[in-house]
Amino acid sequence: MTRDPSQSSRRRFIKISTAALAAAPFAGVLLTKAAEAAEALSESDPTASALGYKMDATKAPNRKDKTSVCGNCSLYSGKPGATDGPCSIFGGKLVSAKGWCSAWVKKA
């Protein structure tokens, strides 16, 4: 006895559709978590305080090189021209591109 190919295709379609409908609510949760924005770093954060982080580099008393800002630091991974971006020193929290801390390292 041979099977009708359309019957197999229909059953497969129903199985896949059912699985997709069951997974849909979970997909929304996963996508929402991935799209969450990173947290902005506060100057009062313990690590930021220890490294003398200032959101405005001109207010950093220990800054010797007047051209050093987070935006031109090798630890900063924000996009060029962005107002803020993630910093590896602060666990990927967002820092101001015009900020500064004592961990600043010139970009190569």
Image (cartoon, grey):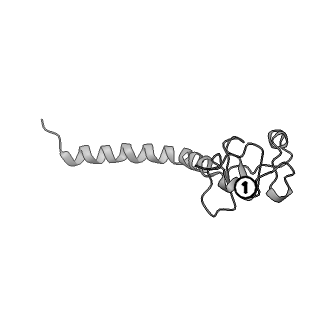
Q: Nearer the viewer, residue 9 or 57?
A: 57
In-image side of 17 versus 63 (left or right): left
Give the vertical position of 75 relative to 59 (above or below).
above
Residue at (33% x, 48% y) in the render = 13
The amino acid type of the residue labelled 1 equals Val
Task: Name, please, the residue furthest toward the top.
Answer: 1
Residue 83, percent across and down?
Answer: 69, 62
Q: What is the quadrant of the N terminus in the image? A: top left
Give the number of marks: 1
Which residue does the numbered mark 1 point to in the structure image? 69
Give the vertical position of 10 relative to 97 (above or below).
above
Q: Nearer the viewer, residue 85 or 18?
A: 85
Q: Nearer the viewer, residue 10 or 79?
A: 79
Task: Name, please, the residue furthest toward the left.
Answer: 1
**Residue 44 seen in the current view:** yes
In-image side of 74 versus 59 (left or right): left
Residue 56, percent across and down?
Answer: 81, 58
Q: Nearer the viewer, residue 27 or 9?
A: 27
Q: Quadrant of residue 19?
A: top left
Residue 35, percent across and down?
Answer: 61, 52
Q: Secondary structure at mark 1?
A: loop
Task: Name, please, the residue furthest toward the front.
Answer: 64
**Residue 56 seen in the current view:** no
Mark 1 packing: few (<14 Cα in 10 Å), some, or many (20+)? many
Residue at (22% x, 49% y) in the render = 6
Residue 40, percent across and down?
Answer: 75, 51
